[in-house]
Image (cartoon, rainbow, N blue to C red):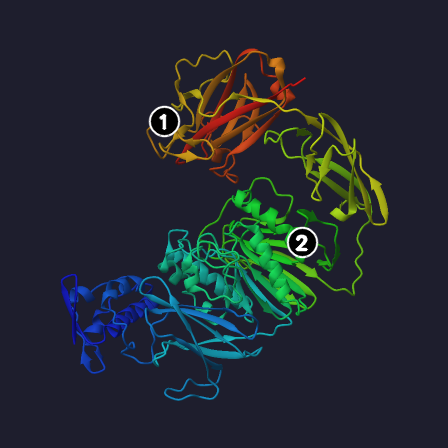
Amino acid sequence: MRLIPLKSKVVEFIGAAALLSFICLSGAESAAADGESKTGLALAESAEMEGRNVQLSKELLNFSGSYKEQYDRFYLLLDRSGPTVFPDASRYLVSSIAFAPGRNEQEMNFSWYSPDTRNSGTVEYAKAGSRFAAGTEAAAVQKSMAHLDIASTGYASNEAIISGLEPSTEYIYRVGDGYGNWSETYSFHTQETDSYNFLLMGDPQIGASGNLKADIAGWNETLEKALDKYPMTSFIQSAGDQVESRNSEEEYEAYFAPDALKRLPTATTIGNHDNTIFYEYHFNVPNQNAELGNYDSSGGNYYFTYGDALFVNLNSNQTNGEEHVRFMEETIEATSGQDFKWKFLVFHHSIYSAAVHSTSDHVLGLREQLVPAIDRLEFDAVLMGHDHSYVRSHQMKGFKPLKNHMIEDGAVINPEGTIYLTGNSASGSKFYPMNEDPEPYSAVREQLEVPTFMNVAVTPTSLEFTTYRTDTMELVDTYKIVKDSSIEVEVPGLSEAVLTATGTILPTEPTDFYPEVVLDVAGTNTEGGQYDLFGENITYRTDPEGAVSISPTGNVNITENAEPGEVEIWAEVAADGQNLTTEPVLLSIVEHAETALVEAESDWTYLDDGSDPGSDWMQPGFDDSGWESGPSPLGYPEGDEREPFGEIQTVIDYGEDEFDKYATSYFRTSFDIDDAEAIGNYGIIDLEADDAAIIYLNGEEIGRYNMADGEVGYDDHLNDLDRENIPPENKSTRITLDGAELANLKDGENIIAVEVRQDNPQSSDVYWDMKFSVNLNTD
C-alpha cells in the first residue's frame, strides 16, 4: 500500500492507474449518455479492485469535467510500473480511435489514445460472425501490435496496421492494452475497388463557432446523412482543419465523437488549424515522407492507392513547392508499376477558390508552384478546403480555364486538364463571404451557409462529383468526367484567335510600379464559344526581334541590351488544322522615374463626429480648419496594426455608442507640385482601408475600394447598401490611375480627400492610410 499526497489530501490506494482509469471511464460513459461529464464518486466509493478497497476523499472525487480534465487532475496518481487494472476487465480506457485507408485496399491504418503507458497496445480483427473469445486464440481472429509513441500529457499514442483485408467483407475489431483489457467491439465493411464511391468533407474545424456541442452536432449530422445516402461508401477524405485549435485535445475528442468515424476509414489532410505535432499524435497515415511537406512537426506528405486510383495528400502549410513537386514525382515513380486510371491530389489550401483566402500570398504562391507539376503529372482532380465555400473550377490547364469540350448526356468526354474542387464546411462551424466578382476559373461557386458534403463516384471509365446541402439534402452541383479512349472526341473548330496583354509598359530597370506584362491568346470556336489553346499551339513574334523575351506562360521581360522604344508583338496559332495570326499589341520600353506625391504616415485633417460635411468637402477650396488633424495611419482601436502601413498613429472617434458607430469618417491632405507637366501618364495608390473608401483628387473622384458605384449618404453603412457583399478586412490594395485621372493634377497645392465607410454600426475598427506615386516624363 502506498500513500500519495495531492494538494494536501491523502489517497490510500493499491493500483492508482486502475483508479484513474475507472474514474475517467465513468466520466466518459456519462458524457456519452447525456453530453456532460459526471463525477466518478458514486461508482468509486463502492468499487473494489481485485478485492482491495480504494478510498479517496470526497473533495477529490466529487469533481466534474471532461475526460481530459479528469485525467489531468488525477495524473499524479498514475503508477505506470505495471499493468493497468480495471474494475471490468472487458473494458479498456481508449479515446480518439482513428482508422484510415492503408497503403492499399488490403490494409487499414489505426491509431488511438490510451492513458500514458509503457506497454504497446494491439488491434484484434476478424470477419463478422467470428467471436473474440476471452482467454483463447480463435483461428479466425488476427492481431496487430501497435507502435507506441508519445502524445500530449497523460496520453500515449498507439499506431497499428491491419492487413490481408478482402473486398466486400464485413469485419469486427477492437483495440486493447496488451494485458487483456479491450475496448468495445466495432465493425467496418470493405467495398469493391473497381466501381466505388468516397466522400469529401470540407473543414469540420470543430470549435470554430465557439459552441463545441453545436459543431459536434453539425459534424455528426453531415456524416450520418451522407452515409444514409451512400451506405456503401469506401472511405472519407477530409480536406483538412479537423479542429479549430491545433493543440486542443478537447476539440480532437469532439472531432472523433461521431460513431461513423469508427466504422468508416478516413483519410485526413493537415489544415492550417491542426498543423502541429498534435495532428501526428492522432493520425496514422500510410507512405508518409516526414522530410517532404512537413511543417511545424505536423507531418509530411503521404499517399495511398485504392483499386486503379492514386491518392496523394500534401501538407500545404509548407509553402516550399519544390518539396511538394518532388514528392509527387517520387510517388509517381514509386508506383510506376501500377496502371492508374485516376489520379487525385488532396491538400488543404485551395488554390482555386472564391472567398477571403483566394488571393492570399500563400495561396497564390502554391498555385504558381504546383500547377505546372499537376499538369505535367496529369492529375485528374484536386480536392481542397480552407475557404469555407463551395467552388468547382472549369477544367484547368496551364493556369487557363478550358471550355471547348465534347458533352454527352451531361458528361464531359475525355477532357484536357484537371478539375479543382473546394469543399465548404462539413460541420457548419464557419463560413466565409464570397468575392463579389466571379473568378475566371470558377464554373460553379456557392455560399449556402449550411454544411455540405461531396460524393465522388469512381468507375473504370468515369468520375462523378455530386455535392449536397445537409439541411434539405438537395443537390448543389454535379459534374461528370468520362475517360474512354474508344470515344472519338468531336468539338467545334477554331474560328479566331485574339492576343491581349495585362500591361503596356516595360521599364528598363526592375520596379513594381507597373503591372506585370503577361500575354494571353484566346481562341473562339465556330459556335462562338471558347476554343482551348495551349502553349504548344502558340508561337510569339516580335518587331524588333530580341528586345524582349516571352516565357511559355506569356510573361514578357526585356532583354539585357534593350533600348527604350516600342515593341510590336503578335502570335501565330497552329490548331485544328489551321494557321492563324493575331492582331499585334504594342508595348513601350521606358526609362522609369517616379515620385511620391503623398507618402504613408502623412498628416491628414479629419472629421470624426458623425456629421454631414456638405457636398463640397472634397473640393480644394473647402475650409477644413475646424477639423482635427494627425499623422496616418488613422482609425481605431488604439494599437490596431495593418501591413504594410503599421500601427494606428491617430485614434479617431466613433461616437458615444459602441453599438451604433458613425458610418463615415472624412480625411483630407495636401501636397504641392512645381511642374505638373513633368508628371507622366501613370499613377498608383497603395492603400489600406477598413472597410471601404472613395478617393478624390482636387474634387474629382479617382477611385473606389470595396464600394459599388452610385451616390452614398453620409450616414449609410455598407450593409445598408449591399447586405450580400460585405467586404473582407485586412486587405491592402492598389488602385491604378491613367492620364485622364492624372490630368486633375495642377501646379501648386493639390488636395486628396477620402471618405472611409464602416460596414455596420457594430464594426470594431476603422483604418486608413495610403501612398500616392506617379511616373515622371523622361524625355
Q: Is residue 640 above or below residue 266?
A: above
Judge the density around disc 2: few (<14), some (14-19), many (≥20) Cα neighbours within 10 Å: some
Q: Nearer the viewer, mark 2 or mark 1?
A: 2
Picture quadrant of residue 41: bottom left
From the top left corner, tell me how far across and down residue 21 is, in percent. Answer: 28, 72
From the top left corner, tell me how far across and down residue 230 is, in percent. Answer: 56, 68
Quadrant in the picture for the C terminus: top right
Q: Secondary structure at mark 2?
A: helix
Say what amino acid the circle numbered 2 marks. Asp
Locate residue 530 relative to residue 678 in the image: left or right.
right
Residue labelled with disc 1: 653
Locate residue 666 relative to residue 559 in the image: left or right.
left
Mark 2 vs mark 1: which is more N-terminal?
2
Report the residue at 41% width, 21% height from top.
607
Q: Is residue 763 above or below residue 252?
A: above
Report the residue at 80% width, 46% height from top.
527
Between marks 2 and 1, how big is the CA–CA gap?
Answer: 53 Å
Report the residue at 68% width, 48% height from top.
398
Picture quadrant of residue 475: bottom right
From the top left corner, tell me how far across and down residue 222 is, in percent. Answer: 49, 61
Quadrant in the picture for the N terminus: bottom left
> From this viewpoint, is residue 573 visible?
yes
Quick one: 682 or 467, which is closer to the camera? 682
From the top left corner, tell me how far across and down residue 263 is, in percent. Answer: 47, 72
Say what amino acid the circle numbered 1 marks. Asp
Residue labelled with disc 2: 375
